[in-house]
Image: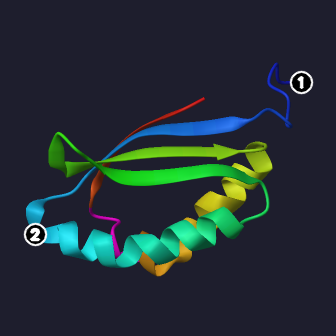
Amino acid sequence: MSSKSKDEIISLNGVLQVPTSDILLVEQLLPLHRELTLAEEGCLAFEVHADPQNQNLYLVCETFKNRAAFKTHQVRNQASKWGRETAHLERQYTIT
């Protein structure tokens, strides 16, 4: 049995690196991505915004009520327009 509880809160924090040529794409797709994520059962918090110090970095902070909710989000995210059209962007995330 794992030492981690299946009801443990899962957080993802990090950055999305966005080349200048993709900023408009991210800004166009982000509102719907945010809306759909916040509507997911088990999403406790979701924030993505441009770093005020660096326009090419977007700060990402997501919190889900448990591992199952996080996994459901990941599956939906990968199948979404956001997931498909931003798949090429470099992500540096820590999941705890």
Taking the image as shown, residue 84 lies to the left or right of residue 34, namely left
Residue 24 location, quadrant: bottom left
Can you tell which of label 1 and label 2 is closer to the viewer?
2
Q: Is residue 84 left or right of residue 50?
A: right
Task: Tell me: residue 56, above or below residue 32.
Answer: above
Q: Which range of residues does the magenta coloring cover?
A: 84-88
What element does badge 2 sit on? Answer: helix
Is the residue 73 above or below the residue 4 in the image?
Answer: below
Residue indicated by mark 1: 1
Would you say the magenta stretch is mainly helix, strand or loop?
loop
Query: How many labels, in total?
Result: 2
Q: What label does residue 9 carry, if any?
A: none
Tell me the amino acid under the disc marked 2. Ser
- Residue sitting at 72 percent across and 65 percent down? 40
Q: How is the image coloured?
A: rainbow
Q: Nearer the viewer, residue 18 or 67?
A: 18
Residue 31 x/y as whole percent: 45, 73
Q: Residues within 10 Å of mark 1 (few under 14, many from 20)?
A: few
| Sequence-wise first label, 1 or 2 | 1
Picture residue at 56% right of the left edge, 52% below the top: 46
86 is within the stretch colored magenta:
yes
Q: Against 23, is 62 above or below?
A: above
Question: Which residue is label 2 attached to?
Answer: 21
